[in-house]
Image (tube, rainbow, N blue to C red):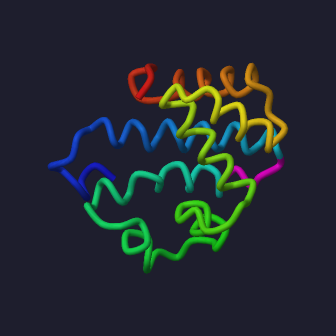
Amino acid sequence: MRSAAPHKPEELVRIALLRGRFCELAGDQVKIDVNAGFLAGLLSVLDALLDLPMERAIGTLPIEDAVRDALLAWHDSKLAALLELAKASERGAWASAQRFGESLGISRRSASNLYFKAMRNSPNGQAA
């Protein structure tokens, strides 16, 4: 991913990996396909990496409709809520994180634990 946008901050790649891992872990807890969760998190920064609107960035990629819809926030789905939970958690937007977590049946404590677990699995073992 880094070689596709060498002029972009390395932080974007770390964010992508952290979101992917979080969505994978949390997705498993709420019975969402973990591969779709990881992919949605990973691709969630593709627009920033390519300097394109998300719709164009993922336009020709052969990805599941559920992943595409979550990335474009077109549908109110569990996968979209999971991705929004990841984004809210990384921003420290706790009220939003709690709202998205509750819509998925994930407690605030559980979401925090999953986020910290994802951080431990991210490059350098630290937050993005």
The quadrant of the picture occupied by the C terminus is: top left
Q: Is residue 108 left or right of residue 20?
A: right
Q: Main secondary structure of the magenta part?
A: loop
Task: Point out residue 96 in the picture as x, y percentages from the top left corner.
Answer: 63, 35
Position in image of residue 53 (x %, y %)? 35, 67
- Residue for point 70% across, 28% down: 111
Image height of 28 relative to 45, above or below: above
Q: Residue at x 52, y 76 (%)?
A: 62
Q: Magenta stretch?
A: 31-35
Q: Where on the picture, by quarter, is residue 22?
A: top right
- The answer to if 33 sits in the magenta stretch is yes
Residue 63, given in percent of the width and then of the height, sits at 56, 71
- Is 13 situated left or right of 71 in this image? left
> Residue placed at 65% from the left, 43% from the top?
24
Q: How many marks?
A: 0
| Residue closest to the eye, 21 or 95 | 95
Q: Residue 66 or 101: which is nearer the viewer?
A: 101
**Residue 113 colored in magenta in the image:** no
- Against 59, residue 36 (above or below) is above
Hey, which residue is sitting farthest bottom in the picture? Answer: 60
Taking 15 as reference, is 82 above or below it?
below
